[in-house]
Image (tube, rainbow, N blue to C red):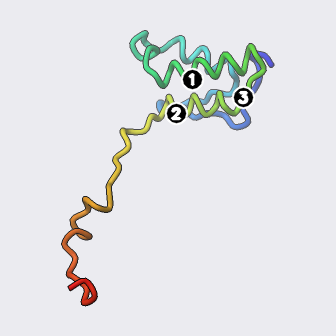
Amino acid sequence: MSWSARFPEPIALPAGGKLTTLEDAGAYITRLPKEKQATKEWQNATHVLIQAADHGGPIEFARLGMMQALWPKGTPVYHSVDKDPKWRNRPKLVRDR
């Protein structure tokens, strides 16, 4: 595969515009500030992009890497059922008395 390979679906950018090829995505990453390029999300996007373009890796992985870098998720919050107040303060059942 080469850098001119197209994504199955173009990637819409937050500020408008689209990335249609691996080359477009690579150019977008190189225009980012160095501090942003050094983040884990963008390092991953760069890695899968190079894998797809130079080593024949799956182009869909490159697309997913770009999507995750463009729209990162926040830190996941896990709620334990044991710590949920609505379950902790439930009335005792007759069988439990």
The CA span between labels 2 and 1 is: 8 Å
Circles 2, 1 touching at the beta carbon (< 8 Å)? yes
Disc assigned to residue 59: 3
Q: Position of residue 62 (x, y in %)?
A: 65, 27
Q: Secondary structure beneath disc 3? A: helix
Q: Which residue is nearer to you in this view: 94 or 12?
A: 94
| Residue tagged 2 | 68
Q: Which residue is nearer to you in this view: 97 or 21?
A: 97
| Residue tagged 1 | 45
Q: Secondary structure beneath disc 1? A: helix
Image quadrant where residue 79 sits: bottom left
Please name the residue shown 26% across and 70% down the image: 87
Q: Is residue 92 left or right of residue 11?
A: left
Amino acid type at mark 3: Ile
Q: Residues within 10 Å of mark 1 (few under 14, many from 20)?
A: many
Please name the residue shown 58% across and 29% down the image: 65
